[in-house]
Amino acid sequence: MKLQRKNRLRALSLGAVAVSGALALTACGSDDTGGGSGGGDAGSAPASNIKCDDAKGQLLADGSSAQKNAMDAWVKQFSAACGVQINYKAGGSGAGVTAFTQGQVAFAGSDSALKPEEVAASKQQCEGGQGINLPMVGGPIAVGYKLSGVDNLVLNADTLAKIFDSQITKWNDPAIAKLNPDAKLPGTKIQAFHRSDESGTTDNFTKYLKAAAPDVWGKYEGGKAWEAKGGQSAPQSSGVSAQVKQTEGAIGYMELSYAKEGMNTVDLDTGAAAPVEATVDNATKAIADAKVVGTGKDLALKLNYETKAEGAYPMVLVTYEIVCDKGNKADTLPATKAFLRYMASEDGQKILAENDYAPIPAEIIAKVRTTVDGLS
């Protein structure tokens, strides 16, 4: 099996790589429904460095499963330092945004930036303010597969789009064979898994296909709900991952942290000199050129899914924490600010690299820290 996580614990270089043009980066995952009171690799950040301020009590949050493993590590450190109980229900980006606009949670995680109608709905809960997007977690959307005898696999956007659109149905299809001349591809039926729930991971995966393979995927509008016919579905990132790991001939999309033992990941032929592996380093090379397009305190981003820059892995997502800029509930505001401040801190971002996520580039995360300090 290819050791695609060989750079997992390596310190990231956050230097920007030139990436031409930009497309809206809206991402959102949906994962396990378990609470986030621990679990995952808590990383090496000492709890003593965390500033608790007046944080106390309990925080409820919901949303992206894409960040679930990172959230577990953050919660473990923050709760140990500050004694605040945090329950992050990774029910998916769609569920998280709904819970936020209905006033059920202190903040939400979403791999897609708020839509105008969602911003309008948030004003009912954010007295004198509105919901804003704070980019906090980055990373590649890995395409995991299970195919006996094939430990290295290269696909391009066109081939991926045809696989997930049920146009390519066998692993020895000529289009796949052309990209993998040295592989012994079996005639096994392809079992393509997609998300059954509304997901920012789906949103960003299909944005990539729409941008990089427009002739195949351009007929679809895109969004958090899966549109293509055929294939099989599973709930949340953990569900897709589990199905791919146990199904011969399977392929599915998920965050890199879910593509661990039991499966290999696809290298992308982007048109660069060499195929690009799904690693946090390569994702950071793409995210580093993201542009802030939100207005005011909103920090929604745009990113280029079509980059051909060497070593840049363009199939990425950024998870936003959704919070009120003004009008947060008085009983949860201190804990919310302290927790978000920790997540955006140097120690908090360091944990991402240790859990197969990409830290947010320095220039962008600096703006996040300033915005968090001003929440009221």
Image: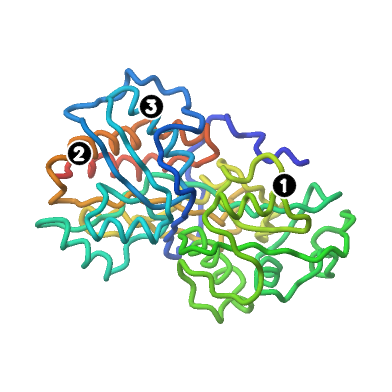
Q: Amino acid at mark 1?
A: Asn
Q: Quadrant of the C terminus?
A: top left
Q: Residue at x 41, y 41 (%)?
A: 35
The answer to whether the residue labelled 2 contacts the one labelled 3, judged by CB atoms less than 8 Å apart, is no
Which residue is labeled 2 in the image? 373
Apparent side of residue 72 relative to residue 367 in the rendered image (left or right): right
Q: Residues within 10 Å of mark 3 (few under 14, many from 20)?
A: many
Numbered disc 2: secondary structure: helix
Q: Amino acid at mark 2?
A: Asp
In this view, the residue in front, 148 or 313, is: 148
Q: From the viewer's perspective, is the residue at label 3 or at label 1 nearer?
A: 3
Is residue 22 depicted above or below 65 in this figure?
below
Disc nearer the start of the sequence (1/2): 1
Q: From the viewer's perspective, is the residue at label 2 or at label 3 nearer?
A: 3
Q: From the viewer's perspective, is the residue at label 1 or at label 2 nearer?
A: 1
In this view, the residue in front, 34 or 332, is: 34
Percent position of residue 47, x then y = 35, 21
Q: Residue at x 72, y 58 (%)?
A: 250
Percent position of residue 95, x then y = 37, 59
Which residue is labeled 1 in the image? 264
Numbered disc 3: secondary structure: helix
Percent position of residue 112, x then y = 40, 60
Q: Residues within 10 Å of mark 2 (few under 14, many from 20)?
A: few
Q: Which mark is residue 18?
A: none
